[in-house]
Amino acid sequence: MTYYYESPSATTTKHIDEEPLVPSMKVGEWLIILLLTCIPVVNIIMLIIWSLDTKGNPNRRNFAIAVLIFMAAMLVLSGFYIGQITGWFFKFLNLM
C-alpha cells in the first residue's frame, strides 16, 4: 500500500511504503494475555502459538516473541548461576 505523509512544517509530501495500521489491543485483551502468561506450562504453549500466528494481531505476536527471547535469556543466566552456586557448595564440602 502507498501512504502519503504531509509534514506540517513543509509543503512537500513524503511517500511512505508501509503496511496498514492494525487496531490497537484493548485493556481487556492485554489483561487476558497477562493472565494466561501467569499460568505455568500454559504460558509457554500460548506464547509459542502467538509467536507463530501470522494472521493475528502483530502487537501480540511481537510481545510473545519478546517474552520468549527474555525467558530463554533468563534460563541461560539462571543455569549459569545455579552451576556456580553448586560448584561453590561442592568445593565447600570438600574442604570440610
Image: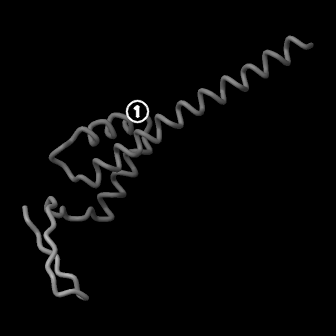
| Residue 77, image quadrant | top right
Q: Is residue 86 above or below residue 23?
A: above
Where 52 falls versus 61 (above or below)? Answer: above
Residue at image point 21% right, 53% down? 57
Q: 56 and 8: which one is in front?
A: 8
Work out whether 11 lies above or below 90: below
Q: Which percent across, then down, holds residue 17?
A: 14, 62
Q: Is residue 47 left or right of residue 9?
A: right
Q: How many marks?
A: 1
Q: Residue at x 33, y 64 (%)?
A: 27
The amino acid type found where label 1 is placed reads Val
Instruction: Return the residue nearer the eye: 74 or 19.
Output: 19
- Characterize the local packing of mark 1: few (<14), some (14-19) or many (20 or more) Cα atoms within 10 angstroms: few
| Quadrant that contains the N terminus | bottom left
Image position of 55 with respect to 59: above or below: above
Horizontal placement of 42 versus 24: left or right? right
Residue highlighted by disc 1: 41
